[in-house]
Amino acid sequence: FARSTGNWRDLLSDPEIDVISVTTPNAFHPEMAIAALDAGKHVWCEKPMAPAFTDAVKMRDAARRSGKAAAMGYNYIQNPMIRHMRRLIDEG
């Protein structure tokens, strides 16, 4: 990485950052994602999206207000199916 910060809020005002990837413990997802969307950043949020349905609704509403893309990520790299697909690709 070219630079780093110990405070995630520093990312919100940085004009060079377009997308925030929220990969923190689940309890922090709503606050971080909503703040990023309100700051005009696109958001990639790891699953689960939020610890409570009401938090997820707030996140959805923030995405709609912002007009920015918001996506929930599913990381399946350890799934046996994905590993098999990788072997098939590697073997041509």
Image (spheres, rainbow, N blue to C red):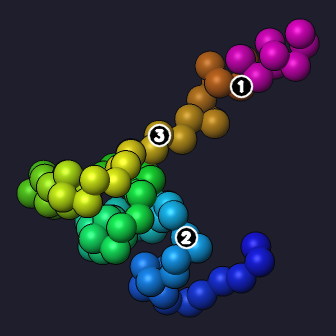
Residue 2 colored in magenta in the image: no
Quarter of the image where the N terminus is located: bottom right
Tag 1: residue type?
A: Arg
Which badge, 3 or 1, comes first in the chain's sequence?
A: 3
Please report the residue visible at 90 percent of the width from the left and 12 percent of the height from the top: 91
Q: Which residues are magenta?
A: 85-92
Q: CA distance from mark 3 to mark 2?
A: 22 Å
Quarter residue 89 falls in: top right
| Cβ atoms at labels 2 and 1 below 8 Å apart | no
Residue at mark 3 to residue at mark 1: CA–CA distance: 15 Å
Looking at numbered disc 2 in the image, what kind of residue is underneath it?
A: Ile
Residue 83: mark: 1
Q: Which residue is mark 3?
A: 74
Q: Which residue is mark 2?
A: 17
Disc 3 or disc 2, which is closer to the eye? 2
Name above or below for residue 32 compared with residue 58: below
Counting other residues with Cα less than 10 Å from the Cα at mark 2, is it few (<14), some (14-19), or many (20 or more)? few
* Number of residues whose C-alpha sits closer than 10 Å to that of mark 3, classed few (under 14), some (14–19) or many (20 or more): few
| Residue 54 numbered tag | none
Decide which of 79, 1 is in the foreground and name it. Answer: 1
